[in-house]
Image: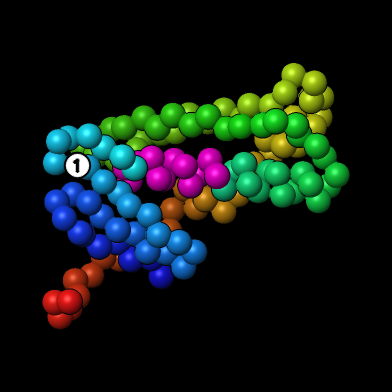
């Protein structure tokens, strides 16, 4: 389970099974980690991590790789409408290997989830003050 709780102002604390982080919009208006950044970073991290894991298992050395992601926002309702994603690979990677790396990256858990959104249900639960 992941828990997000408010601390002070717009500072939020996120507890996950593997670690903690903060989402913050300071009173002076500056922002640190934002929810959209986390969504896009999760997608990029999952794609790149999956690609590197499978490439290693198949004996493929992709070299120094990265993924650039650019979210596009929309309104009514406010949401991430699209994400432009570029898999950046060294020029010496042949076309067959490049195509395989791209195919692998597209099959990570987060990409699959965004392609087939999960059902969600939001409920209200009252808890005692801590």
Question: Does residue 22 lie above or below 81 as drawn?
Answer: below
Task: Find out whether residue 40 is within the magenta segment.
Answer: yes
Q: Nearer the viewer, residue 94 or 22?
A: 22
Q: Residue at x 63, y 26 (%)?
A: 88
Q: Residue at x 17, y 35 (%)?
A: 29
How far across and how far down the image is residue 117, in percent? 43, 53
Q: Which quarter shows the C terminus?
A: bottom left
Q: Residue at x 63, y 47 (%)?
A: 49
Q: Residues within 10 Å of mark 1 (few under 14, many from 20)?
A: few
Applied colour scheme:
rainbow
Q: Which quarter shows the N terminus?
A: bottom left
Residue 83, image quadrant: top left
Q: Is residue 119 visible?
A: no
Which residue lies most toward the bottom here? 128
Task: Specify start and end residues of the magenta stretch as a single range.
Answer: 34-45
Q: Nearer the viewer, residue 16 or 99?
A: 16
Which residue lies most toward the top here? 91
How far across and how far down the image is residue 24, in percent? 26, 46
Q: Residue at x 80, y 21 (%)?
A: 92
In the drawing, does residue 54 fall left or right of residue 37?
Answer: right
Residue at which label 1 appears: 26
Q: What secondary structure is the magenta-colored segment mainly?
A: helix
């Amino acid at each position: 389970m992941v828990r997000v709780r408010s601390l002070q102002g717009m500072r939020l604390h996120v507890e996950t099974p593997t670690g903690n982080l903060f989402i913050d919009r300071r009173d002076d208006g500056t922002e640190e980690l934002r929810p959209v950044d986390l969504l896009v970073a999760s997608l990029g991290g999952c794609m790149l991590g999956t690609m590197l894991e499978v490439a290693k298992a198949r004996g493929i050395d992709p070299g120094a790789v990265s993924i650039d992601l650019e979210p596009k926002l929309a309104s009514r309702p406010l949401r991430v409408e699209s994400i432009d994603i570029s898999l950046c690979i060294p020029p010496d990677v042949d076309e067959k290997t490049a195509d395989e790396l791209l195919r692998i990256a597209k099959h990570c858990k987060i990409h699959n989830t965004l392609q087939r959104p999960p059902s969600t249900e939001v409920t209200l639960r009252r808890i005692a003050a801590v």
